[in-house]
Amino acid sequence: MTLQNIDGPIRKDAEAMLDVITKFSMEVMRPAGIELDRMASPKDVIASGSVLWEVHKKFRELGLHTLQIPESLGGMGGQIDPVAAIQIYEQMGYADAGLTISLSASARTFHLAALFSNPDIQQLARDFCEDREGKMIGCWAITEPDHGTDWGMGNAIPECGPSVRAVLKGNEYILNGEKSAWVSNGTIATHATLHVGLEPGRGMQGHGLAILPLDLPGITRGKPLDKMGQRPLNQGGIFFEDVVLPKKYMVVPSPDFLNTRAGQGLAAVNGGMAIVFAGLARAAFDEAFRYSKERIQGGVPIFEHANIKQKLMKMFAQTEAARAAARQMALYNWKNPSSPSVTHAVAAKCFSTQTAFDVASDAIQILGGYGLAKEYPVEKMFRDARTSMIEDGCNDALAIKAAEYL
Ligand SMILES: Cc1cc2nc3c(=O)[nH]c(=O)nc-3n(C[C@H](O)[C@H](O)[C@H](O)COP(=O)(O)OP(=O)(O)OC[C@H]3O[C@@H](n4cnc5c(N)ncnc54)[C@H](O)[C@@H]3O)c2cc1C
């Protein structure tokens, strides 16, 4: 790492863990991300023998998937120094943002499962902690072909209701509808956190939440999505046709409960994005800085030219501002899980992702023609960063929503 670490001391055990993660991120994630990014088809990314599975398996072997699951269910929850947890996710974003999202999305469903008292649902969290091979993979399925930003806006008008509907019949729900091709891990997930319409008359606010296995009869998948950035991140649609869902899987059967917690969800998801993409900004800065010391033009390293120094200092300031805002927000929200600051989380997400994009773009400029070549990592970082400005909510629409919490 080129940038000086000004976080202050972290616990010794956390320091050791951070060393392990740094090694994993740079020796496993970074090269795997580059290999997966260059694959011609997104089908190759998830083919058996793909390096993607090695990344998931090694992540599990390190036990990192249990970071946010309580000890009573076999996880590491509560033990980790929060500053170290932030540094871990930032370092993973530094190595490969798309893979970081795949790994964290694979765990989020089971973190959530741990919060419910229903023993069958909690058992999922327990089984996930024990899974060291990457057999259980989660996804968060909310976006639908006709409803993207609509979900974040929470429109209450009946014409704007979720397309995936659940109708209660006795002790079972019948599910029908489609989740869009944007679901991260959509074609490889074994389990999902699924947002479903329960009361269509209430628009997007009439929804409930299910945590369910995706091998139930009537569930099928779309083809893996081919996209510009974060190509190592598998994405794809999930289809539901007369799926019989036992009632126990509908963990939130009341829209009111979810509506009062919408801010918590937004803060959690956007908070994570802020940290990961501050990491990507740091990675792009480091590449540009390193290159500026090596590339000779005009008889000197280009670092000696005033315009390059100025650009690097601007990139440095932007990156450090993103990292600082993400850290302060994450520490506050970590300590206040039931009343997190939504505005800080959304502001930090928008700022980090915009910064990652701007810094990666300036990094390309500093590398000149080589910045555009696949031989150097900044071209991929630029594409990955651009993607993040839409991921987990378009930045412009997120700002409109978050302003309500000011
Ligand atoms: C890399 C990546 C990973 C993702 N992972 C997941 C995932 O795991 N699970 C999942 O369910 N989804 C996921 N998504 C989907 C993502 O959440 C949506 O793409 C996003 O919410 C935007 O929805 P949309 O693409 O349908 O755009 P739209 O909602 O169609 O928006 C198009 C444009 O219109 C603007 N707009 C729309 N409505 C309004 C409004 N009311 N006010 C003002 N402006 C508006 C938007 O800002 C945007 O510029 C992912 C997306 C990406 C790119």
Image (cartoon, rainbow, N blue to C red):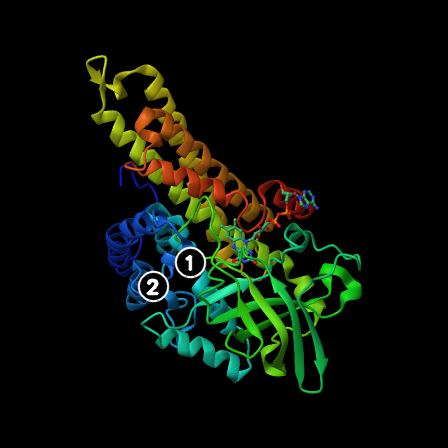
Question: Is there CB contact under 8 Å for labels 2 and 1?
Answer: yes
- Say how many tags the image has: 2
Front residue (pair 19, 48): 48
What residue type is disc 2 on? His
Mark 2 vs ligand 1: CB below 8 Å: no
Secondary structure type for disc 2? helix
Question: Which quarter shows the N terminus?
Answer: top left
* Residue 2 in the image, given as x and y percentages of width and height: 27, 37
User: Which amino acid type is marked by label 1?
Assistant: Ser
Q: Is residue 327 something that shows in the picture? A: no
Residue 174 is situated, as x and y percent measured from the top left of the image, at 67, 78
Residue 328 appears anywhere in the view: yes
Q: Give the quarter of the figure containing the C terminus.
A: top right
Who is closer to the viewer here, 117 or 366? 366
| Outermost residue, bottom side | 170
* Circle 2 Cα neighbour tier, 10 Å, few/some/many (<14 / 14–19 / ≥20): many
Query: To which residue does mark 2 refer?
Result: 56
Q: Earlier in the sequence, mark 2 or mark 1?
A: 2
Mark on residue 202? Answer: none
Q: Nearest the camera: 298 or 380?
A: 380
Q: Residue shown at 60%/46% (left/top)?
A: 343
Between 4 and 199, the residue placed more toward the observer is 199
**Residue drawn at (49%, 54%) of the image:** 225
Decide: few, some or many residues near mark 1? Use Cα within 10 Å; few <14, some 14-19, many ≥20.
many
Q: Tell me how far mark 2 sits from mark 1, CA to CA.
A: 9 Å
Q: Which residue is mark 1?
A: 102
